[in-house]
Amino acid sequence: MTANQALIELEGLFDEKGKFTPNCYINRDLSALRFQLRVLAQAANPNHPLLERMFFLTIFSSNLDEFFEIRVAGLLQKMKQGDQVSSLDGRKPSEILQIISKIAHGAVDEQYRMLNEDILPELAKHEIRYLKRDELNDKQRAWMKEYFVSQVMPVLTPISIDPAHPFPRLANKSLNFIVTLDGKDAFGRDINLAIVPAPRSLPRVIRLPDELTGGKDHHVMLSAVIHEYIGELFLGMTVTGCYQFRLTRNADLALADDVDDIAKALEGELNNRRFGQKVRLEVTTNCPQQISEFLLREFALDSSQLYRVNGPVNLTRLLTSFDYPRLKFSPFTAAIPKAFQGLNKADTGSMFATIARQDVLVHHPFHAFSPVVNLLWQAANDPDVLAIKQTIYRSGVNSEIVQALAAAARNGKEVTAVIELRARFDEASNIAVANMLQEAGAVVVYGIVGYKTHAKMMLIIRREAGKIRRYAHLGTGNYHAGNAKAYTDYGLFTANEEVTEDVAGVFWQLTGMGRPLPSKQILHAPFTLHDTLMRLIDDEIAHAKAGKVGRVIMKFNALTERKIINKLYEASQAGVQIDLIVRSICCLRPQVAGLSENIRVRSVVGRFLEHTRVYYFANDVQNGGQERLYCGSADLMDRNLLHRVEVAFPILDKKLFKKIYEDGLINYLKDDTQAWELSGTGEWYPVVGGTHNAQSYLLNKISLNIK
């Protein structure tokens, strides 16, 4: 189907008091799952190169894993605690789980159909193959036997299932085999079942030697190697069946608000993540029903939680990094903003001089991440720099950001790192970063218990001509060089006194005590961001009611917060024209008669993961009003606006304002090749038949033709 923006009629939108009913909202978890369907659709897009389509298949697997580990696991917990309505749309957890099961089963079936019928046959035409056991010739089979004996068998641990060996405790998402046996073991026991966990230390995909393939990219799966020679583990017995399976568990971490030491508490919880509550079982299609039912009983799961897959049970581990440029997106060289061209990390003080003259904007991945790193290195080595303060959410111990901070501390700078240890699935890495920086002499704090520090801020304090001057970098994305190559994000370098003073105030609050300082420019969650956004929407409502133009454009990852949604409905009913560019979750129903006629919602899914957060309010600009535009770290979710430390920063430079408005908003509203539009029913429909690709436009404009 194609995009359909016709108004729809819905009943029961308002209660007897005129308030919005649950019918006005789309379920959060179902909206999140539908985003994964939009990701999966990229694997079927013939306009994407073949290996990129395969990569989208693996991304879908990874995303779906996390969806089950966090969202489905949370719904199961709520159901067991009483199955009470807790979602905006008025559904019980059990109802939501039932719908999720139907959608997810269909999506997984389609994923493997695409793999087997579309992707793999096309790859084979380019001599990229994943060989099945019956496709190997004699020499390849002999090599595989030697590989099993020398590399695989020594690290395998078969576990029989009998009264002395209860069903083993299996780690989250680990690959395992259940083996059916006939005969007696070495002790004369009749053992008919065993479990063989696949070692995590071995690669899941094994490339056959060039001399056996003529240099072609031919591979065998580790699962095929184990399956072929599983009998070697049970000498004197007959293997009558061998079947892959994988168990998904609850991987969310729960910390009490009164813990004494966040780092120690997290270290204790990380091991528990590997063995959380069971939520999903995957088996291959050839697994007999009695075996799958046995596994379901062992894991206390029902049939709706069973997923039969026609292929490897974990597509995330499939290789997609083959050296075939013609089968991938065309490479590009990220640009350096004109203001920073010719400067590098060795040019002490040069970036500070540039930022002192003007604000500088970077738009990743079209702009390189190197200016952010170079600024830190300059600060680390500059004798005039006194202190550096930085938030870290996802960086990694090998990050140049972390290395530069450590070097600055060793060089005698006052370095303060506010590290959010609870960044999901990066907890262990962040603990290692904290330890590394502490050893270098930096002051490390973990933010505020109960409030994740999600703001993206860097503050550098420098002495110039006997006076103190502050420099800041504020961003919409993490200080992570890898993410900056794959995610779209904005970063602003500024020496504006009011902005940098506000940033200093946020850091004082994060590291010290006391009430928050009043901000002059930035919006700060959980204190001013939510209320200010509500007020800015109210201003547009007032303009519309006065017969003027009311206009709101917002771009973000997710919208779930009820008050913001209700305010947008109110604005629509007042005549405000609203465009929302949403990457993933949207609980607002657009284009519903009497509710949201003036709201359009679209999502752009393409080569890069859309991650920018931009909030624009026209503010009667036609009659001399001053437009407002903020970029920030926060999505419009309860957790971001009310339970996290977030920062939204204004774009005060007129040229940069125009650039973000045109490139980051209007450009995406024009996209008619990668865009999807949301119907009031909650379904997403692709926009087809056009020629404007927002991401390609930015690649051509910024990375190829630097303006």
Image (tube, helix red, strand yellow):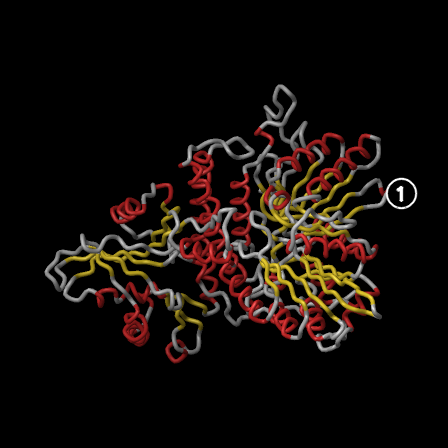
Residue 681 at what x, y percent from top left?
A: 58, 34
What residue occupies the far bottom of the structure in this picture?
A: 211
Residue 321 at what x, y percent from top left?
A: 51, 68
How many C-alpha atoms fall within 10 Å of the one at disc 1: few (<14), some, or many (≥20)?
few
Front one among 586 and 118: 586
Q: Is residue 686 visible?
A: no
Residue 132 at what x, y percent from top left?
A: 35, 64
Asked whether, in this view, residue 74 is left or right of residue 295, the answer is right
Question: In this rendering, is residue 695 above or below 3?
Answer: below
Q: How many marks?
A: 1
Question: In this rendering, is residue 153 above or below 278?
Answer: below
Residue that label 1 marks: 624
Query: Which residue is found at the position 84% from the left and 65% from the top?
Result: 357
Label 1 SS:
loop
What residue occupies the far left of the structure in this picture?
A: 188
Question: In this rendering, is residue 217 above or below 503?
Answer: below
Dividing the image into 4 quarters, which one contains the N terminus? top right
Q: Is residue 98 visible?
A: yes
Query: Which residue is found at the position 72% from the left and 38% from the top?
Result: 534
- Residue 443 occupies which quadrant of the picture? bottom right
Q: Amino acid at mark 1?
A: Gly
Asked whether, in this view, residue 50 is left or right of residue 654, the answer is left
Query: Which residue is found at the position 49% from the left and 47% from the top?
Result: 256
